[in-house]
């Protein structure tokens, strides 16, 4: 089976605590947002203490068009991605020329050539490297990227795949968008990057075995989550029923996925789930019958970094690896939700 050998992460320099973010929202939206004081507890109840952003607070106070946002995305995403990728390569004991394929995941910025092409130059990757940019899966993109990287490594057992996910969710903030979805995003979203090395069967390296993956699409649910593309940028779309969808479907979806592999929820030693928000975490606990401790890695990442869209679930896996390492035996379950509406899940051998 392909293996997830290493993960490394990177965050921008600007660190913002949640109290500051709440006061920032009060200042920006002020008297223009009806009932804002009633909604500000969103920040307190989000389960977040700190987040990181590529811009200084002054940048977010002003409106920006798509061109300005994209220009900053290209510069900042390239720098963050390179830092995370170098960390992953160093942890794996590899040089950039050892990588055969690079897969780049994001949903929060537009660039052509895509960031993976820029990383070929910045990192010194081989000029015959295969590139696969993956855009538009939102929060599900990290799990999907891991699944796709495993498929690529499975097709070529001697190969090494570099998976990079970089999301700059803060660049989608619009100070003139007075929707509740924008306020929720302001309380949740953050910036970050993660990189992972995935190896094929014939590469002698330790790691977490990638045993299986599953995609689940929910028909006629395009309006649950995503972006509306405007001249000013990407406007966030959220529906309040996302936790309800988790409660209604997670046990069946994930239980069926595990049953296909001869397992049940009771066989999972590590639940490595994307922290979409505090209510989503609670919905997973209810649906899967988990105690709060089972979601410690997920809650910890949300607390320390916020929701970084696709990148976040890779932070969760890195936290597990830092605390537990590899070779523990048993199974881990990775899962995340995203636009479509969809879920992406990966079964790991620990």
Image (tube, rainbow, N blue to C red):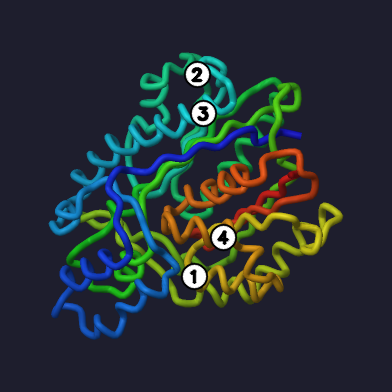
Q: What is the spatial separation of the Cα atoms under label 4 and label 3, in whole angstroms?
A: 24 Å
Q: Residue at x 56, y 59 (%)?
A: 298
Pointer 4 residue: 342
Res 262 → quadrant: bottom right
Single out the mark in the foreground, 4 or 3: 3
Single out the mark in the foreground, 2 or 3: 2
Pointer 1 residue: 278
Q: Is residue 96 above or below residue 33?
A: above
- For disc 4, the neighbor class at 10 Å (few under 14, some 14 to 19, many from 20) is many
Comes first in the chain, label 1 or label 2: 2
Q: SS class of the residue under badge 2?
A: helix
- For disc 2, the neighbor class at 10 Å (few under 14, some 14 to 19, many from 20) is some
Please identify the quadrant where the N terminus is shown.
Answer: top right
Q: What is the spatial separation of the Cα atoms under label 1 and label 2, in whole angstroms?
A: 38 Å
Q: SS class of the residue under badge 3?
A: strand
Q: What is the spatial separation of the Cα atoms under label 2 and label 3, in whole angstroms?
A: 11 Å
Single out the mark in the foreground, 3 or 1: 1
Q: Residue at x 26, y 43 (%)?
A: 70
Q: What is the spatial separation of the Cα atoms under label 3 and label 1, in whole angstroms?
A: 32 Å
Pointer 2 residue: 96
- For disc 1, the neighbor class at 10 Å (few under 14, some 14 to 19, many from 20) is some
> How far across and how far down the image is residue 46, in percent?
42, 70
Q: Residue at x 70, y 20 (%)?
A: 158
* Mark 4 vs 3: CB contact within 8 A: no
Pointer 3 residue: 102
- For disc 3, the neighbor class at 10 Å (few under 14, some 14 to 19, many from 20) is many
Q: What is the spatial separation of the Cα atoms under label 4 and label 1, in whole angstroms?
A: 19 Å
On screen, residue 67 versus residue 168, left or right, reads left
């Amino acid at each position: 089976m392909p293996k997830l050998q290493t993960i490394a992460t990177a965050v921008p320099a600007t660190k913002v605590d949640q109290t500051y973010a709440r006061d920032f929202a009060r200042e920006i939206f002020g008297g223009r947002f009806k009932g804002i004081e009633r909604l500000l507890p969103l920040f307190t109840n989000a389960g977040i203490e700190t987040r990181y952003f590529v811009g200084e607070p002054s940048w977010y106070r002003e409106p920006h068009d798509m061109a300005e946002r994209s220009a900053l995305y290209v510069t900042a995403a390239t720098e963050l991605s390179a830092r995370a990728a170098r960390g992953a390569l160093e942890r794996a004991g590899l040089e950039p020329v050892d990588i055969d394929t690079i897969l780049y995941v994001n949903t929060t910025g537009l660039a052509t050539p895509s960031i993976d092409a820029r990383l070929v130059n910045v990192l010194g990757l081989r000029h015959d490297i295969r590139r696969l940019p993956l855009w538009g899966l939102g929060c599900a993109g990290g799990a999907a990227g891991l699944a796709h990287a495993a498929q690529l490594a499975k097709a070529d057992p001697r190969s090494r795949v570099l998976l990079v996910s970089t999301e700059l969710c803060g660049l989608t903030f619009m100070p003139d968008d007075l929707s509740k979805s924008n306020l929720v995003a302001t309380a949740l979203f953050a910036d970050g990057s993660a990189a992972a090395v995935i190896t094929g069967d014939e590469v002698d390296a330790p790691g977490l075995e990638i045993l299986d993956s599953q995609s689940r699409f929910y028909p006629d649910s395009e309006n649950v989550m995503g972006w509306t593309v405007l001249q000013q940028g990407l406007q966030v779309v959220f529906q309040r029923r996302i936790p309800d969808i988790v409660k209604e479907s997670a046990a069946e979806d994930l239980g069926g996925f595990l049953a296909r592999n001869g397992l049940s929820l009771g066989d999972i030693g590590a639940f490595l789930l994307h922290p979409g928000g505090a209510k989503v975490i609670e919905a997973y606990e209810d649906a899967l019958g988990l105690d709060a401790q089972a979601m410690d890695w997920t809650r910890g990442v949300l607390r320390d970094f916020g929701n970084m869209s696709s990148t976040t679930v890779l932070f969760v896996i890195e936290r597990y690896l830092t605390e537990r390492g590899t070779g523990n035996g048993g199974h881990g379950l990775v899962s995340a939700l995203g636009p479509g509406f969809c879920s992406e899940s990966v079964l790991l051998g620990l």
